Amino acid sequence: MEGLNQYFEGVAWKYLSAVDAERNRSNQHEFGGLVKAGFKKHLGDPGAQTLRWPTRYVYLADDEEESLSVYGSTSWYDARRDDPRRGPELRLYYEDNAVTERISSGMFMLIAKTRGSELLIVFTDAASSGEAQLRWLFELNGTSELFASRTIDQQDFRSGWASVWILKQLGIEPEPADDRWLDVMLDRFGGSFPATREFSRFAREVAAADINAIDSPDDTVVLLMETEEQLFRLLE
């Protein structure tokens, strides 16, 4: 199975504060706190310069057709570089575009550094299917209005429409995973689609080793949805 670390080095995530997103509270268009979260190692030290990162901005809606992706850039710089009396304060400046026009306080956001030296910034509504799928894809735990971050290691790629759609915006076509199940389905269902209940039962069998409905009910629901969708696309 493909590893997510083939595509990404690390991720940072948080819920947007009013200062992050609302024009009447701040006109800076900047995100602070990435250094404290440990994300500086992915962005570098700009010193007295401004580092500009090619950036894919994504708004992830629960409906795939309403999701939006635009290409632009971000700027990583020291807001105190002209004041030698104060220590550095590194911030990430973001652009006005069709995606950032939709953001508001309380939304979930994720910044990912790709292996191709680009940034991916994703916004989605809190407690939405989009947030659940981002958490599932990148294995994220806990969130506040302060950034948390993690390095992407050897974790497997988890397929679902949101994750596949996000990767496609970056020009990445993930290879199908677990295609060993195709022969099983062809033998079991005779080359045609079974009834919905029967197909869902098969998806539960496939995912059984990875689910814990008692300790992690939310993760279990997401995993079952992802597994059933992946198997459906494979059979299709």
Image (tube, rainbow, N blue to C red):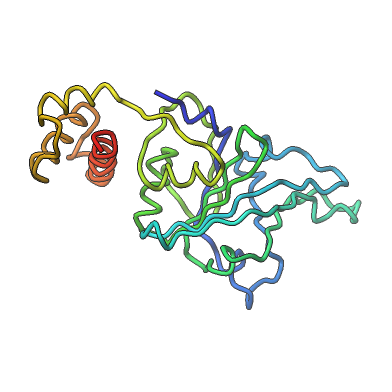
> Farthest front residue?
191
The residue lying at 21 percent from left, 31 percent from top is: 207
Count of marks, rendered view: 0
Q: Quick one: 13 or 173, which is closer to the camera?
A: 173
Classify residue 234 by image quadrant: top left
Classify residue 190 by image quadrant: top left
User: Where in the figure is residue 45, as x and y percent of width and height?
Assistant: 78, 39
The residue lying at 71 percent from left, 57 percent from top is: 93
User: Where in the figure is residue 131, as x and y percent of width and height?
Assistant: 40, 52
> Farthest bottom residue?
24
User: Where in the figure is residue 215, as x and y percent of width and height?
Assistant: 22, 39
Q: Quick one: 147 or 11, which is closer to the camera?
A: 11
The residue lying at 46 percent from left, 26 percent from top is: 3
Q: Quadrant of the N terminus?
A: top left
Q: Is residue 102 above or below residue 7?
A: below
Classify residue 185 by image quadrant: top left
Q: Is residue 11 visible?
A: yes
User: Where in the figure is residue 62, as x and y percent of width and height?
Assistant: 36, 59
Q: Quick check: 139 left or right of 54?
A: left
Q: Is residue 145 visible?
A: no
Q: Quick check: 233 left or right of 27?
A: left
Q: Quick one: 167 or 137, which is closer to the camera?
A: 167
Q: Is residue 83 above or below residue 6?
A: below
Q: Quadrant of the C terminus?
A: top left
Q: Quick check: 220 left or right of 205?
A: right
Q: Quick check: 213 left or right of 69?
A: left
